[in-house]
Amino acid sequence: MIPKISTLSGYLHEYQKSLANPVGFWSNIAETFYWRKPWTKTLEWDFKDPKVTWFKDGKLNITENIFERHLFLRGNQTALIWEPNNPDEAHRSYTYRELYEEVNKFAGVLRSLGVQKGDRVAIYLPMIPELAIAMLACARIGAIHSIVFAGFSAKALAERNNDAQAKILITADGGYRGNKIIPLKETSDEALQMSQSIEKVIVVKRTGQDVNMDKKRDVWWHDLMKNAPQKAPAEIMDAEDTLFILYTSGSTGKPKGVLHTTGGYMVYAAYTFKNVFQYRPNDIYFCAADIGWITGHSYIIYGPLLEGATTIMFEGIPTYPQPDRYWQIIEKHQVNQFYTSPTAIRALLAQGETWVDKYEMNSLRVLGTVGEPINEEAWHWYHDHVGKGRCPIVDTWWQTETGGIMISPLAGIIPTKPAYATLPLPGIRPVIVDNDGNKIYGKNVEGNLCIEFPWPGMARSLWGNHERYKQAYFSTFPGLYFTGDGVKRDEDGYYRILGRIDDVINVSGHRLGTAEIENALNEHPLVAESAVVGMPHPIKGQGIYAYVVAPDKPDNLDDELRNSLVKAVAKLISPIAKPDQIQFVSGLPKTRSGKIMRRILRKIVEGSTDFGDTSTLTNPEIVEELTEGYRKLNIDDK
Ligand code: WT7
C-alpha cells in the first residue's frame, strides 16, 4: 500500500526524509506497485540539458496496476460511477471487473485495427464512460492517447492530430452539455479535411443524431465491441515509455504536446491522490473536471483507479437543469471528497445560497479546488455553504506539466488559510527567484516560482520538440524548472500563487495563450494587428481583452466587426477563447525593436496608470489613446 501521511508531524517527517534521501523516499513508494521487472536506478537527472529518468529499466503496465492489482480484493467494488447530463437518465456504474472487461475488449479492438505500441490515438469524446475505457485501452496496449477537450474547434483538433500524427480518432455522434448538443462527429469530419494521418474513426453513439459515416474510414464503437476478443494481454512498457500526450497552451501560438511517461506518472498520480484527498477505502470521490484536461487525467481516472477508489465521472455542467446539480450528485452518491474549480464555485455563489443550503451533504469530508487562484470570498462560501464549516479545503496548485499536485494542504492535516496553496508535497522543492535568477530565501517574499529538483510526475518532453521543452521550462532560470507562475511565501512559510507571469492567461481555469487568440483575430481581413491580455473578471478569474488595430474598418461597423471577431475565435479555437472585450486602437505600444510592451496593456485593463518606464517606446502617445479607449468602454459606459 502507498504510504499515507496522517498527522502534521508525519508530514514534516516525510518531507524531511524526501529532502535528505529522495531516491529512498520515492523507491519506497514505487515498490508498492506491480512491476514486471524492477528498476535498476531510481533517478538520473539533468536540468541544464534537461533529461529526467525515473525507475530506469523498470517494466510495467499502468492498467495492470489499476486492474490486475485490485481485482482479487475488489473485483466487485464500484470503480466508476457515471452520472449523465440529464438527471432523469439513469446513472451507470462499473465494478473494477466490469471496467476491466470493457478495457480489455476495446484494447483488443484497437489492436485488431493495427494500433501498436507507440502509435498515437486521438480521443475527442464527451464525458461518457467510453472516454475512460478508450484511454485505459490505449494504456493497455502501449498506444499513446492524446485527448482533446470536446469543446475545441475543428481547427484546434486538426492541429493537435497533425502534430501528434495520430492514427486513429475516437469520437461520438454528439455530446450533451446542459441544454446544448455538441456535434462532435460533424466537427471531427471538418477536422479530418485538414489532417491526413488519421486512418480510422471510431464513433460512439451517444445522442443518436444523424451523422455522416464514411464507409472506408468510419466505424461504430458498438459494432466493433460486439465481436471483440475478451482478453487483451497488457503490453509491457518501460517506465520511461510515453503514456500520453496532452496539448496545452504556451506563450507562442502553437499548442504544446506535454509528454508524460508511464512509471513516474503512475507513482506520482496515485501518491498525491491518496495523500492530498486523504482517500479511505470505500469513499466515494467526485472530481468535476473534464477528462480533456490534466485534472481529469490524473484525478478522475489514473490517481483514483490506481488507488482502488470509486470515482465519479459527470457528463454535464453545474447549472443544468438547475444550479444545484453538483449538490444533488453529492447527496445521491454520498460523496466524501469533492474537487472543482474556483470558477465553478464563483458561478454557483452568484446563484445565491438557497440552492446549496437546501442540501445537507453530510457525507462530505474534503473539498478541493484547482486551476486558478481562489479569492477569499469564494473560499469562504465553499467552506461555509458547501462544506458547512466541517470540511478542510485543499487548494491544489499544479500544472499540466507537473502531472500531479505539487503544493497543497493534505486534507485535515495541514492547517489551511484562504487563498493559500500552503506547503509543498513531500519530494517537491519549490524555490522563489528574482528576475535575475537569484534565489530569494526567508519569509514574506515574492517572486518567480521554480522547482529545483525532479519529481516522478514531471513532463519529460514536448511531443516531437525537445528543444522547445528546454526553452519553455529550463532556460529562463538555468538549472531550474520554471513554472510561469508568480508566488508569495508568507510569514508561516505558506505559498500563495499569484498567477501567470508569462503570456498565458487563465480563463475559468482554462489555460490559453494570448498568441493563439491573436493569431485567430489576425486572420480577419480587416485586422492588421492585435494584442490580447487577461483582465480581472468576477466569475472567470481572468477575462480576455483584445486590442485590435483595424485601419480600414468603416467607422460605423464597430459592433459588426466585434461580433464577427468573437465568432472567428470560437470557430478557430473554442468558445472558451472568445474575447470578452474588443477595443479598436490605432496602434500598439512598441519598443524600437518592434516588441509590443505588454506590461502597459495589462496595466490599462487593471485600471492602473502606473506604467513604469515608457521611455523606450517609439510611440508613447499611444498610451493615452488606449487608456482613454479603455475608460470609454468600461467606465463611462457603465
Ligand atoms: C496553471 C496551470 C493543474 C490543473 C489545472 C490547470 C494555475 C493551477 C492553481 C491554484 C492558483 C493555479 C497556475 C498554473 N493554477 N492551480 N491552486 N492556485 N493557480 O492546469 O491548464 O496546466 O494550468 O494554472 O497558473 O501555472 P494548466
Image (tube, helix red, strand yellow):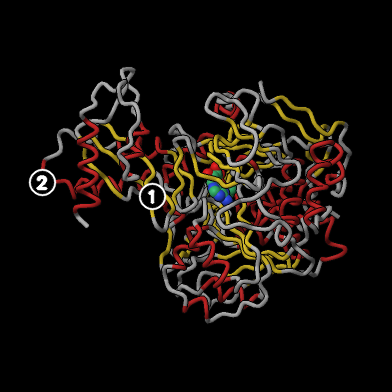
For image coordinates 49% across by 40% down, the residue present is 500
167 sits to left or right of 36: left
Q: Does the residue labelled 2 lie within 8 Å of ligand 1?
A: no
Which is more N-terminal, label 2 or label 1? 1
Residue 199 visible at all? no
**Quarter of the image containing the N terminus?**
bottom right
Q: Label 1 is placed on what type of residue?
A: Pro
Q: Percent position (x, y) of residue 8?
A: 77, 55
Q: Name the residue under label 1.
A: 536
- The Cα atoms of the two marked residues, 1 and 2, are separated by 29 Å
For image coordinates 25% across by 51% down, the residue present is 634
Q: Label 2 is placed on what type of residue?
A: Asn
Q: Nearer the viewer, residue 496 or 290?
A: 496
Farthest top residue? 593
Dot 2: few (<14), some (14–19), or many (≥20) neighbours within 10 Å? Answer: few
Q: Which of 167 and 181 is in front in this view?
A: 181
Front position among marks 1 and 2: 1
158 sits to left or right of 601: right
Dot 1: few (<14), some (14–19), or many (≥20) neighbours within 10 Å? Answer: some
173 sits to left or right of 225: left
Looking at the rendered structure, the secondary structure element under dot 1 is: strand
Q: Percent position (x, y) of residue 290?
A: 55, 56
For image coordinates 56% across by 74% down, the residue present is 327
Q: Name the residue under label 2.
A: 556
Q: Is residue 358 above or below residue 163?
A: below
